[in-house]
Image (cartoon, rainbow, N blue to C red):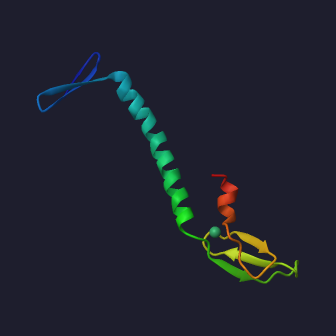
Amino acid sequence: MSWDDSGLTLVLGGEQIHLPVLVIIAFVVSFPVFLFVLLRLARFFGATARPCRWKRMPAKDRPSFVLWQCSICAVEAYSSGRQPPKECKKLLKSGV
Ligand SMILES: [Zn+2]
């Protein structure tokens, strides 16, 4: 492995691989962005894989509705029937 004016030269098993400085800079700059996207994706899939756990809450102000609260993301939602909301409101809010 050696540096020269045009970049980095790697020697792997008798083969020389030349990496220009621009490629190394582009990699270093794009790496945090790539990591951020990866984390966003991991969080998104983690959230979809875990369904909401809805808890029935007493609804004082709207007697004809049932108030539900998700114990995972602490989001409150109303429904008119006995069934809890199907989707997590947190996912809808984040817009992904
Ligand atoms: Zn939820």
Nearest the eye: 95 or 1 = 95
Circle count: 0
Drawn side of residue 36 relative to residue 77, left or right: left
Quadrant of the displayed image that contains ligand 1:
bottom right
Drawn side of residue 42 relative to residue 89, left or right: left
Residue 55 vertical position relative to residue 25 in the rendered view, above or below: below
- The residue lying at 83 percent from left, 78 percent from top is 65
Residue 5 vertical position relative to residue 68 in the rendered view, above or below: above
- The residue lying at 76 percent from left, 82 percent from top is 82
Residue 30 vertical position relative to residue 51 in the rendered view, above or below: above
Can you say which quadrant of the picture contains the N terminus? top left
In percent of width and height, residue 34 lies at 46, 42
In percent of width and height, residue 24 lies at 35, 28
- The residue lying at 69 percent from left, 64 percent from top is 89
Drawn side of residue 6 relative to residue 31, left or right: left
In percent of width and height, residue 13 lies at 12, 33
- Extreme top residue here? 5
In percent of width and height, residue 5 lies at 28, 15
- The residue lying at 39 percent from left, 28 percent from top is 25
Nearest the eye: 12 or 82 = 82
Drawn side of residue 82 relative to residue 11, left or right: right
- Extreme left residue here? 14
Residue 16 vertical position relative to residue 90 in the rendered view, above or below: above
Kindly indicate the quadrant of the structure image that contains residue 44.
Answer: bottom right
